[in-house]
């Protein structure tokens, strides 16, 4: 992932969005412009790289100490949403210290707030998706998910569901009715012929797209009326002003009510300490976004807050080779997403549940 | 004041003394509890990966037992209600034992909450003022509120009653009776809210129906009294305290009614769900017949159904219902059947298939099973102490000796 590249066109609509000028704190290579907790870093790129190296070295030398003291302080912090700006900065600085020591690199924990006039929206062209799952991979790499060997250590936020095409073809007419679709096409009406899931997301084809498959990618729908937020007993998950539903990982008690309440299976539990190799850890993070999680808390897609709040696209949008994924500001009539909603055939998943997703599907 | 000061040591001195049978029972429970503590340690160092919980099925044995034990706690009201509302003499004498059971059951619920949570160290986030309490939005918030309230009500009522017996004074009815009436209504509320907890999630069609609260209450009022009958019979065999047949007979009548209603509600659910057999019935279908070749819970479902039907037939026959030798068999069948039906049989199929249609199965690990057994053991440890103390006071074995004796013993 190259963090030096200039943002592509600002997805949030430049005129109402602060994202057009990325905050320095989100990019470790850009110099710091405003005085802050990282004021010790000089405002010159050359000096910065040297001093940050020194800082990292200093942290590495006593990494165990730093981790222990910082973690102790973390236990007593409040709910992020209710903190004052100073407390928020302190909490982020504390995390930066711990992560830098833990992953042996300079880690940034950004705290950019929602910009006024922005409501993020997502649109996905199901006709274009070829099922390559580059989005799944890019998401894991960008968002510091656990990637171990055991089933509980592998967390993916996107599933690309592979749907069998040709359920109703002539050669299948006598095999019972396909359970997912519930239309009888012969066979014994009371005994489905075979095990047919509605969609597989662990498929290993030689090449994509496959002739006999459709693909349906899903992830968190960032509902306007999220059931997960309603059930949370400690208000650790909430809707941000610009749309995404986020989690304060330091406040989550791991009760998993949100996971039961989510109709889209978007939430994942860290059943063990996430397996995140030091060299693969993405150091550009956001407090409510992709910062490394701890054991026993729930996580989910947050539309790459560390990117989108800086005017960049989410990793899945950027990586999609066929341009099936679109992202932008729903309040800006000129944004790509707004134009899609205005002109294309659009639907939302499980609309009958009144969760009002901001993730739309469309087809040409 | 002297009475209160001497109450505590007198109480402890009595409950900690016992014969070989008592000590071996308590020793067994203590060993099982220690194993559970080790499991809890593993869960909080390794994480929940030591359990069989996955991202598809993330509530299992712990949540199932939690739900079931809320019912047992609420079931204690089947003693308190006839005692104080219908002024049933036999029940009135033993009503405090019901309160002791309620206290232990609520404590067990809390133990299972601890076992279930990913981050029990952050429980303080739920304490108002230091943390945040998401009311009125979160059903879990309401559940914690009503459970703690029920614990306090039963503690207050139970120990106030025992204390007056101990000191030989009279119960102040102006304070006591309102608390009793509140606790009766409160018992219904704890189980109603627990039903709302899972029934308010359209994401899980298996749970999303309005029959859930009444079904919870009838199964609670069947399973709770079954356990109470068993406990009463053990008390009759092992202590000098005699519980009248009338009390046990009334409880078995309550079980008969509630077990019948519960079977009727199960039947209604099966007919309504499987007649149309929409995708929303997949969970129930998995439970009854298996789905896509996965059939782990099928024998449990049919086993529990048979146990409940046989128990109902036994309870329905007056000659068996009043037979103190056969009654325990019926009670064990009904209690076990409801434990399966309302625990694993309700919680696990709620996750099968997952909201995106994935069919997976739940395999509890040994650690999970040992934790569950150990947490039950902790509950029974507490229950034994509470019942022993209560019986000692009711028998007059623990009694305030007057100021002279109290001072002399100092």
Image (cartoon, rainbow, N blue to C red):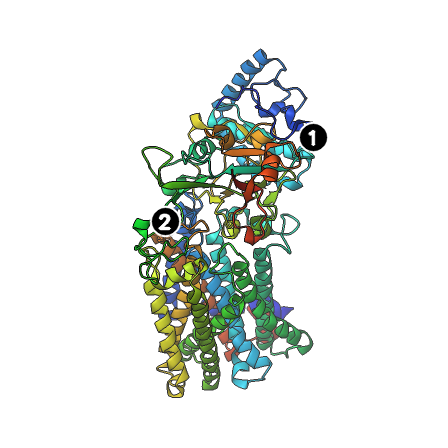
Residue at left 56%, top 33%?
A327
Same chain under badges 2 and 1? The reply is yes
Give the number of the mark in front: 2 or 1.
2
Residue B97, numbered circle: none
Depth check: give the residue in front, A346 or B207. Answer: A346
Residue A16, numbered circle: 1
The image position of residue B336, as x and y in percent, is 38, 69
The image position of residue A154, as x and y in percent, is 40, 39
Would residue A184 be visible to someone looking at this image?
yes
Would residue B378 be visible to someone looking at this image?
no
Residue at left 57%, top 71%?
B158
Depth check: give the residue in front, A161 or A30. Answer: A161
How far apart are labels 2 and 1 at the CA level? 47 Å
Depth check: give the residue in front, B270 or A173. Answer: A173
Neighbours of disc 1 within 10 Å: few (<14), some (14-19), many (20+): some
Q: Quadrant of the N terminus of chain B?
A: bottom right
Q: Earlier in the sequence, mark 2 or mark 1?
A: 1
Neighbours of disc 2 within 10 Å: few (<14), some (14-19), many (20+): some
Instruction: Assign a secondary structure to mark 1.
Output: helix
Q: Is residue A284 above or below residue B41?
A: above
Q: Quadrant of the C terminus of chain B?
A: bottom right
Residue A167, numbered circle: 2
How many discs appear?
Answer: 2
Instruction: Assign a secondary structure to mark 2.
Output: loop
Relative to A299, B331 lies left or right: left
The image position of residue B276, as x and y in percent, is 44, 65
Relative to B164, B338 lies left or right: left
The image position of residue A157, as x and y in percent, is 47, 39
Q: Circle 1 marks a residue in which chain? A: A
């Amino acid at each position: 992932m190259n963090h030096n590249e200039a943002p592509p066109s600002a997805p949030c609509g430049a005129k109402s969005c602060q994202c057009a000028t990325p905050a320095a704190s989100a990019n470790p290579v850009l110099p710091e412009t405003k005085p802050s907790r990282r004021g010790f870093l000089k405002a010159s790129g050359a000096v910065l790289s040297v001093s940050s190296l020194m800082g990292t070295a200093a942290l590495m030398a006593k990494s165990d100490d730093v981790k222990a003291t910082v973690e102790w302080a973390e236990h007593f912090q409040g709910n992020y949403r209710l903190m004052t700006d100073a407390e928020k900065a302190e909490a982020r600085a504390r995390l930066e210290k711990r992560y830098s020591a833990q992953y042996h690199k300079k880690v940034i924990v950004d705290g950019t707030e929602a910009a006024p006039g922005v409501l993020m929206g997502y649109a996905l062209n199901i006709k274009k998706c070829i099922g390559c799952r580059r989005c799944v991979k890019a998401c894991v790499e960008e968002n510091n998910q656990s990637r171990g060997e055991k089933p509980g250590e592998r967390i993916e936020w996107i599933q690309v569901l592979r749907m069998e095409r040709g359920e109703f073809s002539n050669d299948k007419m006598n095999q019972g009715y396909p359970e997912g679709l519930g239309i009888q096409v012969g066979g014994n009406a009371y005994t489905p012929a075979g095990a047919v899931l509605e969609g597989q997301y662990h498929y290993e084809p030689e090449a994509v797209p496959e002739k006999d498959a459709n693909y349906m990618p899903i992830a968190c729908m960032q509902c306007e009326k999220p059931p997960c937020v309603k059930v949370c007993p400690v208000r650790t998950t909430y809707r941000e002003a610009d749309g995404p539903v986020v989690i304060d990982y330091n406040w989550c008690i791991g009760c998993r009510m949100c996971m039961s309440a989510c109709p889209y299976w978007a939430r994942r539990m860290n059943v063990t300490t996430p397996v995140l190799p030091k060299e693969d850890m993405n150091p550009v993070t956001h407090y409510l976004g992709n910062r490394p999680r701890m054991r026993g808390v729930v996580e989910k897609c947050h539309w790459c807050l560390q990117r989108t709040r800086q005017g960049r696209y989410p990793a899945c949008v950027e990586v999609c080779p066929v341009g099936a994924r679109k992202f932008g500001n729903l309040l800006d009539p000129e944004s790509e997403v707004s134009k899609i909603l205005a002109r294309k055939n659009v639907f939302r998943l499980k609309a009958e549940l009144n969760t009002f997703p901001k993730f739309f599907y469309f087809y040409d | 004041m002297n009475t209160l000061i001497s109450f505590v040591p007198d109480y402890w001195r009595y409950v900690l003394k016992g014969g070989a049978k008592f000590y071996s029972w308590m020793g067994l429970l203590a060993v099982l509890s220690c194993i559970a503590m080790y499991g809890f340690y593993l869960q909080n160092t390794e994480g929940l990966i030591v359990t069989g919980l996955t991202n598809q099925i993330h509530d299992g044995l712990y949540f199932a037992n939690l739900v079931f034990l809320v019912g047992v706690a609420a079931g204690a009201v089947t003693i308190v209600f006839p005692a104080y509302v219908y002024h049933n003499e036999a029940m009135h004498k033993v009503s405090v034992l019901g309160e002791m059971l309620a206290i232990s059951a609520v404590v067990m619920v809390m133990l299972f909450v601890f076992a279930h949570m990913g981050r029990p160290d952050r429980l303080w986030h739920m304490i108002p003022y230091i943390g945040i309490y998401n009311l009125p939005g979160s059903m879990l918030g309401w559940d914690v509120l009503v459970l703690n309230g029920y614990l306090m009500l039963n503690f207050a009522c139970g120990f106030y009653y025992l204390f007056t017996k101990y000191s030989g004074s009279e119960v102040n009815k102006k304070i006591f009776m309102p608390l009793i009436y509140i606790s009766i209504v409160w018992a219904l509320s704890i189980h109603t809210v627990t039903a709302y907890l899972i029934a308010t999630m359209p994401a899980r069609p298996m749970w999303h129906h309005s029959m859930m609260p009444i079904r919870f209450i009838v199964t609670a009022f069947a399973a709770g009294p079954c356990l109470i009958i068993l406990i009463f019979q053990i008390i009759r065999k092992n202590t000098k305290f005699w519980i009248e047949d009338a009390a046990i007979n009334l409880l078995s009548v309550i079980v008969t009614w509630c077990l019948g209603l519960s079977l009727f509600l199960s039947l209604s659910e099966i007919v309504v769900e499987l007649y149309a057999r929409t995708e929303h019935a997949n969970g129930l279908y998995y439970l009854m017949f298996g789905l896509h070749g996965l059939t782990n819970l099928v024998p449990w479902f049919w086993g529990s159904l048979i146990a409940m039907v046989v128990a109902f037939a036994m309870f329905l026959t007056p000659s068996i219902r009043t037979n103190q030798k056969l009654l325990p068999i019926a009670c064990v069948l009904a209690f076990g059947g409801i434990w399966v039906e309302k625990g694993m049989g309700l919680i696990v199929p709620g996750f099968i298939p997952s909201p995106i249609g994935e069919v997976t199965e739940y395999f509890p690990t040994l650690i999970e099973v040992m934790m569950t057994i150990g947490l039950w053991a902790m509950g029974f440890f507490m229950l034994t102490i509470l019942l022993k103390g209560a019986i000692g006071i009711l028998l007059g074995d623990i009694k305030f000796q007057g100021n002279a004796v109290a001072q002399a013993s100092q």
